[in-house]
Structure formats: C-alpha cells, structure tokens
Amino acid sequence: MATIRIPPTLRAEVGGVRELDARGDTVADVIDDLVTRYPALETQLLRDGELADFVNVYVGGEDVRTRDGLDTEVRRGDQLILLPAMAGGC
Amino acid sequence: MAVRAQPASLLDLVGSTPLLELPRLSPRPAVRLYAKLEGQNPSGSIKDRVAKAMLEAAEATGELAPGRRLLEPTSGNTGIALALAARLRGYPLTCVVPANVTAERRRLLQLYGAEIVDSPGEEGSNGAVRLALDLAESDQGFFMPFQYANEANPRAHYEGTGAEIVDALERVDVLVAGLGTGGTLMGAGERLRETFPDVVVAAAEPLPGDEVMGLRSLEDGYVPPILDVSKLDRKLLVTNAEAVAGLRLLLEREAVLGGVSSGAVVHAALQLADDLEEGVVVCVLADGGWKYLSADFWDATDAESAMERTVWW
C-alpha cells in the first residue's frame, strides 16, 4: 500500500481528496489501481500506455523518469506525488 | 587613463563568476563541494548570461533591431537581467509577471525600466507564459526572446557556466542546478559531459504549493522545449521547507546568502553527496538572497505554509 498525493487539477476526479491510498509494487501497478477506481484519470495520466508528457510522477522524491519509469519499484509506505509539469525558471 | 582597457558596459562583466569551495558544508573531507556563485553577475543572477546571449543572438540574425519592444514572461530574474541588458542596448521591455512575486522583484524590474503586465498569480509561471504568447501573437512589434524555447539559453551555459567549471576543476562527479527552463542543466550538463563523461547531472526541482499549481487540466502543463529530461541523470523534488533548510545551512556554515533555488540545490547536493565516499560536487547557485528579504520564510518555524502561495524559482 502506497499513498498518492493528488494535485489540485485532479482532485475533482477523486472526490476532492488531497491524498489517496493505492496498491501496487510498481508505479504502473499503482496507477493501474488508481485508474481502475477512477476511470476518468486514465486519459489524464497515460498516453499509449506511457506517462503523459505533462504529468510528473515522483517516488521517494525523485521523478520516475530518471529512475525506472513506470517500472519504478514502489515499496510499502512510499509516497507517490503526481504533479503537472510546471514552467519554472523565473 | 586606465593601464589596460576596462569594461565599458556591465554586459562585459557577465559570467566568469567565482567558484567557491564549501568545506564547512561537505559531509566528509574526501567529498569536495563547490558553489558557482551566479549571484555575482551584474543584475544579481545567472540570468544575465541568458539575457545577454539571447539579445546577441537575435541581433546577429537581424530579428532584433532598434524600434522593436522586448517581451518576456518571467517571475523575476530573467526580467531583471533582460531589463539591464535592454537598457544598455536601447530597447524597451515588457515583462509578464505572476501577480504574486516578491515586492523586490517588481521594484527591481521597474527601476531597470521594464513595463510590467501581471498574469494571474494562481496560474504560476504557466499563466505568465500563456499570456505572453498571446500578447506576442497579437502585436508583431514585440520581439519575445522566450528563454523556454531559445537555444541561446542552453548555449550560454554550454559556452559560459559549463566551460568555466571545466576550466576550474580537474574532476566533477556531480553537477547540481535548479530546474526552471532547463537551460543551465542542458547547457552546462552537456559541456561537463564532454570532459567528464561519467558526471551525474542532477536537477533540483521545486515542489510547488497547491495554490500556485492552477486548477486547469494537466494538459495545460508546460515542458520547456529546450528541456530534454532524458539528458538528466537525477531529478529531485525539493520542498520549500527543505530549500529554506538548505539556505540556512549555507548561511550558517559558509556565510553565503543564497536565493531560494540555491537552498534547494544545496539540499539536493547534500543528499547526493551523502552517497559518495569521495568525489567532487558542483552546485550552481543561481542568485543571492537579497531579492527575498521581504519574504517571511527566513525565521518561520513553518516555512512550508509561509511559502506556498508564491512561485520561488
């Protein structure tokens, strides 16, 4: 069981909550569990089975794109953070 | 008369910033920690490199010539740097700025002569980018350097920041810089890889407060065209509270007053340095703390809630 932090943009799809629990040993499994329960999230998070370009997923504070992508391991008690890609660079 | 030619424009003083070793911050003596002090640039940030390079590149191609007005979405440093460069080169400048940036930034932009257009604060930088793109489309008199998509941005860091680090050090194992447009990480990262093929290029990325993330769909997210995430080896999220903890350490141990992204870079660098037995870690500190003095996080016990309403880098 991992917790997932939901960004404000997606909270309406999940009943307004900021954080959810989800099951899975990899990021792919956790997202699968999430979209099974909240199907409206699927088109927002995934494109052709990959993470959508404008979605960042972090496990242990690191972007899964610089880890193992959707195969990144999720351990019990890990926190996943979903964020929209933001322009920075003030 | 001077003995030798002295600079006759602040633009001649951009770059060649000091590289300072931070022995009091290093977790162990065999790990050498260095900071590239980009706050020493003329307008106080690394963005002087980018502003100068973008204007020179546009003048060289003829896209930018007298009579045009510059336009740029920026929550601060790029605008201030562009305003300095634009004033010296003789161009007027309009900056699109999220409404909730710190007072110092707004004041500095005005003092250097920029006109300010506010974008909705709750939309963060994405909102500023969107509004600036709309304005540029509606008025052909604007020339928008647009640091997010301008190759002169990473090139300034390839030819400047990165080359200077390579010249100064015989070995670099880790390069840490803040992730904004991606210019520093792409440009300096590429230059360092040429000389040190195994260097780990690590991004410190802000975890934005809920209030600045906006409420539109994820499809309104923005990935700067110059940023290629596949060229990053690490991409680490740093909370505002962690960035402030990094800032305080930097100030207490080394008496370096950094800006918020510098605190985040120090935090990430210490995290990465912890995994090293020995080696060389270089932190790019993008600006000093002067522009953040009015912010109330310095002494706050709860830095996170003191900072969640603003985009910091």
Image (spheres, helix red, strand yellow):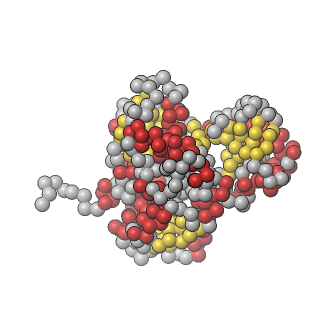
Seen at 50% across and 34% down, the residue is B270
Task: Please say if A70 is above or below B313.
Answer: above
- Label tally: 0
Q: Quadrant of residue A28?
A: top right
Q: Quadrant of residue B211?
A: bottom right
Seen at 44% across and 25% down, the residue is B28
Front residue of B208/B156: it is B208
Q: Position of residue A56 (x, y in %)?
A: 67, 46
Seen at 79% across and 34% down, the residue is A1
Front residue of B101/A73: it is B101
Q: Position of residue B313 (x, y in %)?
A: 53, 53
Residue B31: in sight, yes or no?
Answer: yes
Q: Position of residue B261 (x, y in %)?
A: 50, 48
Residue B146: in sight, yes or no?
Answer: no
Horizontally, residue A54 falls left or right of residue B67, namely right
Horizontally, residue A49 falls left or right of residue B109, namely right
Q: Position of residue B111 (x, y in %)?
A: 39, 69
Task: Please say if B177 is above or below B210.
Answer: above
Horizontally, residue A3 falls left or right of residue A40, namely left
Instruction: Point out the image quarter for the N terminus of chain B.
Output: bottom left
Front residue of B183/A10: it is A10
